[in-house]
Amino acid sequence: MKISNPVVEAQMLIRRSVVDCFEAFVNPEITTKFWFTKSSGRLALGKKIRWDWEMFGVGDSLTVKEFEENRRILIQWESDPTIVEWRFEAHGPEATLVKISNWGFVGDRDEVLSQAIDAKGGYTMVLAGLKAWLEYGIELNLVLDQFPKD
């Protein structure tokens, strides 16, 4: 049975400027502090980038479909091929509401539901890691510690 495709949304207020929050997702030297461990480069319009989570031996490529400096990034994953959108909304001079939306899940009802639940949890964790890093300079290792080897 097919179901309508859900849009998964996660958001977090980060007490840093829009410029800082946007740069955190564009610049892999920052993003590796709270999400993946390796990247083939900075995000930019039209670029194909690979992100790796070396601790798990997995990675994926993405293509940047839309890119509005300090406002919005839209990417398409290669392997699944869902769409992810980041939006950055200023809340005063030193706070940003970062919103992540993910859609395009494929499969039957149970598969789509499972993917949507995983995406919601994953992007919520990414935002929590971003908040800890940008506001306090702390690497929480949330992604690593979610699936410990033991």
Image (cartoon, rainbow, N blue to C red):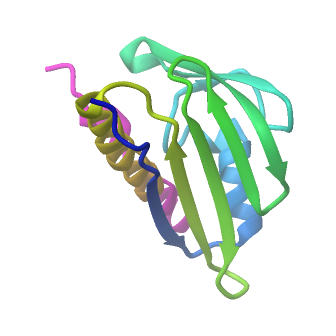
Relative placement, left or right, of 138 versus 63 is left
Q: Outermost residue toward the front? A: 1
Quadrant containing the N terminus is top left
Q: Residue 124: x and y, percent?
A: 39, 54
Residue pictured at 76% horizontal, 35% vertical: 64
Q: Residue 88: x and y, percent?
A: 67, 66
Between 1 and 113, the one nearer to me in the picture = 1
Residue pictured at 62% horizontal, 79% vertical: 95
Vertical placement of residue 63 versus 56, above or below: below
Residue pictured at 72% horizontal, 49% vertical: 73
Q: Would you identify the image quadrant in which residue 112 lies? A: top left
Does the segment drawn in magenta span residue 92?
Answer: no
Relative placement, left or right, of 1 versus 29 is left
Relative placement, left or right, of 34 versus 25 is left
Does the segment drawn in magenta span residue 131?
Answer: yes
Asked if residue 138 shows in the view, the reply is: no
Asked if residue 14 shows in the view, the reply is: yes
Quadrant containing the C terminus is top left
Between 116 and 121, the one nearer to me in the picture = 116
Q: Would you identify the image quadrant in which residue 115 lies? A: top left
Q: Outermost residue toward the top? A: 57
State how many labels appear: 0
Q: Would you identify the image quadrant in which residue 65 lies? A: top right
Q: Outermost residue toward the bottom? A: 92
Q: Residue 74: x and y, percent?
A: 70, 45
Q: Residue 14: x and y, percent?
A: 54, 71
Vertical placement of residue 67 versus 49, above or below: below
Vertical placement of residue 84 versus 138, above or below: above
Vertical placement of residue 69 versus 111, above or below: below
Part of the protein shown in magenta: 130-150
